[in-house]
C-alpha cells in the first residue's frame, strides 16, 4: 500500500511539474470573411495624367483615403487591354494592362502600396467571353479547321425557309440561313452573329463584339485557368467572376420560353433557361476553387450571381460541401424583386442569408457599376441621406462580407444622360429612351467641391461630373461629423473593433413592418449588440424585450446613432428613418 501510495505521489508530482498542453489555437478566419470590399471603376476614380480618364496611378494616390475609411480590399473592374466597347468587359489580352490606365508596373505598384496599408487587390475576371479582337477569336473566325476553330460557340443556323421561326430569327437572314434559335443578347437583338468567312453564326450573350467562349472544349478551360495562375502568381488576392452563370449554353440549341411582353430593346422577354445556370458550370467552379485554394493567403473567388432565391445561391457555394465559390453575391437583399426600403422587405431576405446557406458567409451588395445607385433606388426624395445611412447599416452591421461601390459612402447620385447623343454606354444608345444605359452610375468620383470634383484637371472628363459635387464630395464630408462618409467610417470601425460585429452570429428580432432589428453576439465573450433601423416615416418607441423577449429592458449603451435616436427608461426612441446601435451593459443580456 505504501509502495503504491509512493508511486502515485511521484506520478502526481511529475504531472504537476509537466507543462500543461496548450489548447489548440483557433484557426484564423480567412481575411475575406466579414471583409469590406470596395469596387473601383478605374475610368471614374481618379485621373493622374489629366486626359479625362481615370487610371491606376490615380487609384494609388488615394489609397490613404481607403485606409482611413476602413476598406479591406479593392475590387478593380477590368484594367486589361480592350477596345472598350463594354468599357473593359471585352478583353483583348488577359495578361496585360490597357495603356489608358497605365502599365503593368503601375498595377504592381498599386498592389504593393495597397498591401502596405493592409488592403488587398481583387481583379475582375471575364471568363464567359472575350473581345472579338482577341487573337483567339480572330483565329477562330478565320477558319473552321484551325487550332482554335472550336474555341467559341459556332452554329450553321437553319434554312431561312424553316417552319416556326421566331421574329428574332426571321429578321436575321444571311446567305439563306438564320440563327438556330430565338436566343437574344442581354444588350438587344439576336444572340447570334454571322461571319461570312466561316459561313456560320457565333453566339454572344452580350454585345456582338463579345463572342462567348466554348467551355465544352477542354482547351478553353486550360487556357483560362492559365490566366488565373498568371495573376495569382503576381500576388492578387483573388477574382470577381463576371457573368459566371452564363459559361454554358444548351448544346441542343432549343428555344427559350417567352415569358410575355418585351424588353427595352423591343425583344420578347425570355426565361434564360438555355443560356444561364446550366449544370456543367458547377464542375468548372469546383475545379477553379481547387486551383485557387492551392495558393497561400486565402485567395478568394467572388461570383456575379443574380439568382432567383437563396436555395439557388446556396448551390453556388457548393451546398453543404462549400467547395465552389467562396462568396457568390447575394443580390436578393440589395436588388431583389420589388425592392423597397421597408423592414418587412429586408427581414426575410436577411434571415434566409443567415439560415439557409449551410453557415457560409453571405456577401451583401447594394451598389455596383451596372445598377442605379442605392440612394436613388431606396430614397424617398426627402429623407434620402437618412435612408442611405440605414442601407449602410444593413450592409455593414450584418453578419456578411460587405461589397460597396466608389462614392456610395458619399451619397453620390445616379446622373443619367438627358440626351441620346451624350450617351457613352452602347445599350443606352440602342435602347433609348426606355434604356438610358449605365453612364449614370459611373460618373467621376467626387473628391472636392472644385473643378471636375477633383477627379481631373481636364474639363473634358470621359463622363460629366455630377452637378451636386459642390455639396457631395469627400473633402466636405470628411469635415462633417454627421455626414454619410462619417457614418460609413464609424460603422467600419465598429465592425473591426466590436467582437460581436466582427465575428458574432446574427439573429433577426421583431416582426414590425417598419422596425428592422437584429442582434449580434460575441462568440467568445457573449456580449450582445443590438441594431435597430426605423425604415418608416413616423417616430417609434420600442423596448428591447418587445423585439426579443431574451433582451433585458435596460443596461444598453449606444455605440452609434443617427437622427437623434436615444435609449432612455428602458425604451428606444427612434425618430423617422433613425438608426440605433447599442451594446449590452455589464448587467445586460448575454
Image (cartoon, helix red, strand yellow):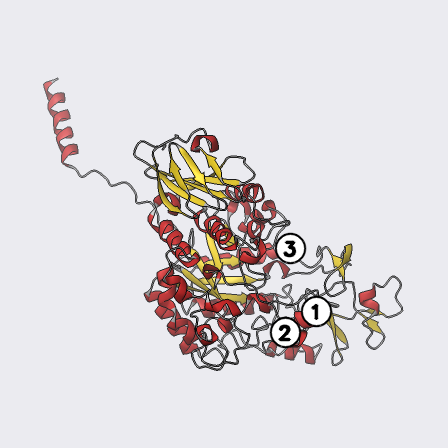
Of 272 and 471, nearer the camera is 471
Q: Name the side, left or right, on which 183 lies relative to 336.
A: right
Q: Determine whether the residue tagged by mark 3 lies in a helix, strand or loop.
A: loop
Measured Cα–Cα span from mark 1 to mark 2: 9 Å
The residue to which callout 3 is attached is 277
Task: Tell me the quadrant of the picture where the C terminus can be found.
Answer: top left
Q: Are marks 1 and 2 in contact (CB under 8 Å)?
A: yes
3 or 1: tag closer to the N-terminus: 3
Q: Which mark is residue 432?
A: 1
Q: Determine whether the residue tagged by mark 1 lies in a helix, strand or loop.
A: loop
Q: Name the side, left or right, on which 308 lies relative to 475.
A: right
Of 2 and 183, nearer the camera is 183
Q: Which mark is residue 484?
A: none
Q: Residues within 10 Å of mark 3 (few under 14, many from 20)?
A: many
Q: Position of residue 470 (x, y in %)?
A: 46, 69
The residue to which callout 2 is attached is 423
Q: Position of residue 205 (x, y in %)?
A: 67, 65
For the point 50% across and 46% down, which residue is it?
Answer: 577
Amino acid at each position: 500500500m505504501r509502495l503504491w501510495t509512493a508511486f502515485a505521489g511521484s506520478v502526481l508530482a511529475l504531472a504537476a511539474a509537466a507543462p500543461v498542453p496548450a489548447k489548440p489555437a483557433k484557426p484564423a478566419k480567412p481575411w475575406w470573411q466579414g471583409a469590406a470590399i470596395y469596387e473601383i471603376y478605374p475610368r471614374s476614380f481618379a485621373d493622374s495624367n489629366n486626359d479625362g480618364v481615370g487610371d491606376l496611378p490615380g487609384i494609388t494616390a488615394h489609397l490613404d483615403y481607403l485606409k482611413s475609411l476602413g476598406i479591406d480590399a479593392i475590387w478593380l473592374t477590368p484594367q486589361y487591354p480592350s477596345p472598350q466597347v463594354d468599357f473593359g468587359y471585352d478583353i483583348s489580352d488577359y495578361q496585360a494592362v490597357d495603356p489608358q490606365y497605365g502599365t503593368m508596373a503601375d498595377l504592381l505598384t498599386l498592389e504593393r502600396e495597397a498591401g502596405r496599408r493592409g488592403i488587398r487587390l481583387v481583379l475582375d475576371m471575364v471568363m464567359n467571353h472575350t473581345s472579338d479582337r482577341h487573337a483567339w477569336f480572330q483565329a477562330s473566325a478565320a477558319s473552321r479547321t484551325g487550332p482554335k476553330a472550336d474555341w467559341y460557340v459556332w452554329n450553321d443556323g437553319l434554312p431561312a425557309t424553316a417552319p416556326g421561326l421566331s421574329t428574332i430569327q426571321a429578321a436575321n437572314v444571311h446567305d439563306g440561313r438564320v440563327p438556330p434559335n430565338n436566343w437574344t443578347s442581354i444588350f438587344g437583338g439576336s444572340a447570334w452573329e454571322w461571319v461570312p468567312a466561316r459561313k456560320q453564326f457565333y453566339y454572344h450573350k452580350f454585345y456582338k463584339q463579345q463572342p462567348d467562349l466554348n467551355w465544352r472544349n477542354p482547351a478553353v478551360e486550360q487556357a483560362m485557368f492559365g490566366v488565373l495562375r498568371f495573376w495569382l502568381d503576381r500576388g492578387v488576392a483573388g477574382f470577381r467572376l463576371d457573368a459566371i452563370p452564363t459559361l454554358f449554353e444548351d448544346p441542343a440549341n432549343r428555344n427559350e420560353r417567352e415569358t410575355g411582353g418585351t424588353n427595352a430593346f423591343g425583344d420578347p422577354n425570355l426565361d434564360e433557361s438555355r443560356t444561364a445556370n446550366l449544370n456543367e458550370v458547377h464542375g468548372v467552379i469546383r475545379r477553379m476553387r481547387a486551383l485557387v485554394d492551392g495558393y497561400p493567403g486565402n485567395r478568394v473567388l467572388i461570383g456575379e450571381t443574380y439568382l432567383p432565391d437563396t436555395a439557388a445561391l446556396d448551390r453556388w457555394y457548393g451546398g453543404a460541401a462549400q467547395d465552389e465559390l467562396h462568396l457568390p453575391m447575394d443580390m436578393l437583399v440589395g436588388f431583389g424583386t420589388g425592392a423597397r426600403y421597408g423592414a418587412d422587405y429586408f427581414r426575410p431576405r436577411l434571415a434566409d442569408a443567415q439560415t439557409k446557406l449551410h453557415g457560409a458567409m453571405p456577401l451583401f451588395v447594394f451598389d455596383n457599376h451596372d445598377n442605379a445607385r442605392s440612394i436613388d433606388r431606396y430614397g424617398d426624395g426627402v429623407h434620402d441621406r437618412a435612408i442611405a445611412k440605414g442601407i449602410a447599416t444593413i450592409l455593414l452591421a450584418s453578419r456578411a462580407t460587405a461589397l460597396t461601390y466608389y462614392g456610395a459612402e458619399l451619397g453620390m447620385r445616379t446622373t443619367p444622360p438627358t440626351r441620346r447623343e451624350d450617351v457613352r454606354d452602347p445599350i443606352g444608345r440602342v435602347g433609348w429612351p426606355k434604356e438610358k444605359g449605365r453612364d449614370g452610375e459611373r460618373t467621376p468620383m467626387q473628391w472636392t467641391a472644385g473643378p471636375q470634383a477633383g477627379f481631373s484637371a481636364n474639363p473634358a472628363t470621359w463622363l460629366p461630373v455630377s452637378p451636386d459635387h459642390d455639396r457631395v464630395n469627400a473633402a466636405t464630408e470628411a469635415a462633417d461629423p454627421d455626414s454619410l462618409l462619417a457614418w460609413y467610417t464609424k460603422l467600419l470601425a465598429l465592425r473591426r473593433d466590436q467582437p460581436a460585429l466582427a465575428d458574432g452570429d446574427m439573429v433577426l428580432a421583431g416582426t414590425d413592418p417598419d422596425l428592422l432589428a437584429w442582434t449580434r453576439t460575441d462568440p467568445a465573450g457573449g456580449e450582445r449588440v443590438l441594431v435597430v433601423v426605423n425604415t418608416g416615416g413616423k417616430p417609434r418607441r420600442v423596448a428591447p424585450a418587445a423585439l426579443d423577449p431574451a433582451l433585458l429592458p435596460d443596461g444598453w449603451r449606444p455605440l452609434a446613432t443617427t437622427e437623434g435616436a436615444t435609449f432612455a427608461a428602458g425604451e428606444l426612441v427612434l425618430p423617422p428613418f433613425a438608426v440605433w446601435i447599442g451594446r449590452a451593459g455589464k448587467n445586460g443580456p448575454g
